[in-house]
Amino acid sequence: MSLRFDSLLIILNKLDSGEIVTNRSLMEELDISERSAYRYIQSLIIANFPIWFDRKRKTYAFVEGYRLKRQKIPLKEEVALSIAQSLVEPMGKEVTQALEGIRNRLCGTSSEQTEKIIHPDRNMPGTIADYLSQLYRAISERRVVEFNYRLSPETEPFGRKIDPLYLFNHDGFWYVRGLCHNADNLRTFAFDRIIALDVTNEHYRKYDINEAEELESAFGPQLDGEPTDVVLRFNPEIARQVMRKKWHLSQKEKRLPDGRIELSFTVIGTETIKHWLYRWLPSVEVVSPATLRTQVYKELLQGTKQHKVPLDET
């Protein structure tokens, strides 16, 4: 029933945007039989949607002048409200729910969409803001997006096609999480590495994914990989500062006899937590895993060579 309902919504959105809709196109896009495609159209007609077959254009269409109910405010303002709602989440449920009520009355959309923008940033370049609006629209309408992607300024861009699922911000950088058609798996893409983004007219089905759980298991934007247990020890002089907040949902603390604090995490990958622990140098030690300890040692050794200064012999 859920897949059928999703398919009906996709058909309605395609009709509303004026796309070519035929039994053949629905068969290919929704992976259904011709009989099912015909039944879906008939179900919408029985539900009093004014659909007819335009013989001139050879497509199903809404009668002239009919449109689905749309948001009452511009897209950029809807995005701004979603960002504002995420921004006030630390203030408690009462404030969050109050803003959500205002947003729903203005936009006429379900609160589910407000969960697609997580942890906003206040300083946003124009290009990033444009991508945010385009990707938010793509997620709301379940549209496939295409773009060129560059891993670094020195590498050549390559094409990617994804079903965007949600957006999030980490340390001032925006990311889109989605199913990558090229890799046939979930992937994360940074906005600042995206080139020439295009929201296509191709729709995708709803995915059963818990955005909050995915982000809770990660330490930053690294969401792919195997869970890794990380143990760090912090010297007494920074212990109080480190303990001022909980850095990860899995965090466990232990105070050692010598005054140090031991923190344990279970995270996806170690690259992001490695960069985080560097902020506490030289007052932090990697206990495990051994691979991370070795990596940190080698990088610090390289760093000392790059920062070598003459010793004061006076």
Image: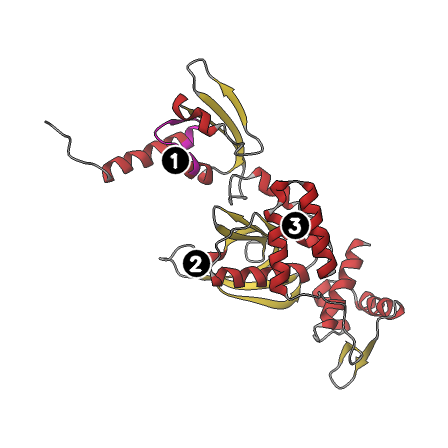
Q: Quadrant of the N terminus?
A: bottom right
User: Mark 2 highlights which residue?
Assistant: 150
For the question of whether residue 138 can be seen, the reply is no
* Res 287 → quadrant: top left
**Nearest to the observer: residue 180 or residue 137:** 137
Mark nearest the camera among 2 and 3 is: 3
User: How far apart in space, not on screen, are marks 1 and 3 (Cα)?
Assistant: 32 Å
Mark 2 residue crowding within 10 angstroms, few (<14) / some (14–19) / many (20+): some
User: What is the residue that sits farthest to the right in this orientation?
Assistant: 46
Q: Are marks 2 and 3 in contact (CB under 8 Å)?
A: no
Q: Say left or right for 286 vs 92.
A: left
User: Among all residues in the image, which is located at the extreme top?
Assistant: 257
Label 1 neighbour load within 10 Å: few <14, some 14-19, many 20+: few
Q: Residue placed at 49% from the left, 26% from the top?
A: 263
| Of the pair 18 and 75, the residue shown nearer to us | 75
Q: Residue furthest bottom?
A: 56
Picture coordinates of residue 265, whole percent (x, y): 52, 30
Vertical arrangement, residue 178 with respect to residue 296, above or below: below
**Viewed as shown, does residue 256 lie left or right of 29?**
left
Range of residues picked out in magenta: 276-292
Residue carrying label 1: 278
Q: Quadrant of residue 104?
A: bottom right
The residue sitting at 37% across, 57% down in the picture is: 153
For the residue marked with disc 3, what is the amino acid? Glu
Q: Name the residue that disc number 3 marks.
A: 115
Asked if residue 190 is among those painted magenta in the image, a careful observer would answer no
Q: Is residue 169 visible?
A: yes
Report whether 86 appears left or right of 123.
right
